[in-house]
Image (cartoon, helix red, strand yellow):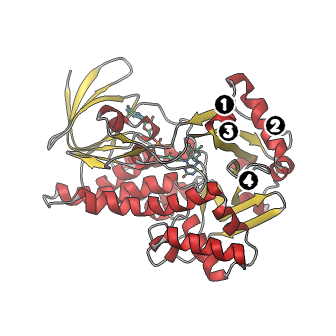
Amino acid sequence: SSSQLADVAIIGAGPSGAVAAALLRKAGHSVLVLERQHFPRFSIGESLLPQSMAYLEEAGMLQAVVEAGFQYKNGAHFVHGEKASSYDFRDKHSAGWGTTYQVERAKFDDILIRCAAQQGADVRFGHAVLAIETGDAPSLEAADEAGNAYTVKARFVLDASGFGRVLPRLLDLESPTRMPARAAIFTHVRDALPAGSTDRNKICIAVHPERRDVWYWMIPLADGRSSVGCVAEAAFLDVPEAGREAKLRELIRTEPTLAALIGDAPFLMPVRHIGGYAANVERLYGPGYALLGNAGEFLDPVFSSGVTIALRSAHLAVRTLERQLRGETVDWLADYDRPLRRGIDTFRAFVDRWYTGELQDIIFYPAQAPSIRRMISAVLAGYAWDETNPFVADPVRRLNTLHRACMTL
Ligand code: FAD
C-alpha cells in the first residue's frame, strides 16, 4: 500500500468539508478530501439560514451558489391550526445577510466541493476512511472501491463525515445527547404553489393539530417541487418501510395548511426515514484532529441550523488550524470548541422550548414587541453567535422571562 502526503486530510466532502478545504487552500495549504460516495448524492438538510451566506462568501463559493438558481428564501412561516406567524429574516436584530436559499442538497453539495477543487483541493470520490492514528503526525487508512488500501500522512485531520461520524466511532468519542430519540419521514412532492407566490420564499413549519411535539416541514425548492417531512418521537413514525408512504399521506391530510398546499400531489421519490440523528461528543478536538459539523454535535432539524453550524465550524476550525500550521500555540478548547458551542447552546435553548411548547407560545403570541421579534428573528436566521442579542447572550433566562410575559399579559 502506498503513502500520500497533505498538510490537511479531510474526511467527507459535504458542506463542512468543502468549506474547510477551500479556506485552507486560500491560506496556501495542501488539502486532500476523501469522500466515500460519488456526487451528486442525496442529502437531507435543504433549508439554509442567512448566516451561512457569510461563510460561503468567505470560501469563494457565493457566486456559484447564487448563479445556480436555487429557491430564494427570506424567512419562516409557522402554523398551528388557526394560528399563524411569519418571520421575515431581513427584519432582524443582527447585521448581515437576511436572505438565503432552499436547495436540493445533491446539487448544492456538488457545487461547493467543485469550488473547493477549483481552488486546488485534491478531492477523491469513492474513497472511504477506515482507520486513524492520532498524534502530532496523524495518519489515515483509506481505500478506494476496488479495495486498494493506502495511508495518508498529514499534519492535521478534519473529520467532516457528518452522520458517518467516522472519528467519534473509531476513537470512541461519543457522549450522550440530552435530546430524546426522534425521527423523520420525508419525500419530495410536485407542489401546487404558483411560481412567484410569496409562500415559496419561506420554509413552512406546521405543528400537528393534536400533538405539539410533532411538526412538519414544507420547503419549496426550485422547479415546482417541495421537500415535505414530519418529525416526531421515534415510536410515532415506526412503521414498516412499505407503510411509510401511507403514513406520510395520512399525516399531511391531518394538518389543514399542508393538506391545502399539497393535497394529493404526487410524491417524486420513495418516502425516506431517518432516526437517531441527535449526537454529541465529549470534545470537538484531540491530538492531531478536530470534528466539524455533524461529525461533532447535532441537535435537531426544527430550526434548519445544521448546515449553518457546519459552515461556522469549518470557519472557526480553519482559523485555529491556520495558526497552528504557522507554528503558533493554539488552544482548541478556547479557540474552537467553546466558541462553536456557544451558538449551538443558543439553538439548544430554542429547540428545548419548541418541544415543550413554550417557544410555540412565544412565536404565536400576537402582540410581541417589534424589538423582541427582531431578536428572535435574528436567532432563527442563524445569528446564534451574536452576543449583542440578549437572546444569544442569555437565551435560557430571556426565553423563560418572555414566555411568562406572553402567558400573563
Ligand atoms: P454531511 O453533509 O453529512 O457530509 C458528510 C459526508 O461525509 C458525506 O458525503 C459522506 O458520504 C461522507 N462520509 C461519511 N463517512 C465517510 C468515510 N468513512 N469516508 C469518507 N467519507 C465519508 N440542516 C439545515 O441546514 N437545514 C435543514 O433544513 C435541515 N433539515 C434536516 C432535516 C433532518 C430530518 C435532519 C436529520 C437533518 C437536517 N439538517 C438540516 C441537518 C443537515 O442535514 C446536516 O447538518 C448537514 O448536512 C451537515 O453537514 P456536514 O458537512 O457536517 O456533513
Q: Amino acid at mark 2?
A: Glu
- Crowding near pointer 1: few (<14 within 10 Å), some, many (20+)? some
Residue 207 marker = 4
**Residue that numbered label 3 is attached to:** 186
Q: Amino acid at mark 4?
A: Val
Query: Residue 274, relative to residue 303: is it above or below?
Result: above
- Crowding near pointer 3: few (<14 within 10 Å), some, many (20+)? many
Q: Secondary structure at mark 4?
A: strand
Judge depth for marks 4 and 3 and give the one in front.
4
Q: Is residue 257 left or right of residue 146?
A: right
Residue 191 marker = none
Q: Secondary structure at mark 3?
A: strand
**Residue that numbered label 2 is attached to:** 250
Residue at disc 3, CB closer than 8 Å to ligand 1: yes
Judge depth for marks 1 and 2 and give the one in front.
1
Q: Amino acid at mark 1?
A: Asp
Q: Is residue 87 visible?
A: yes
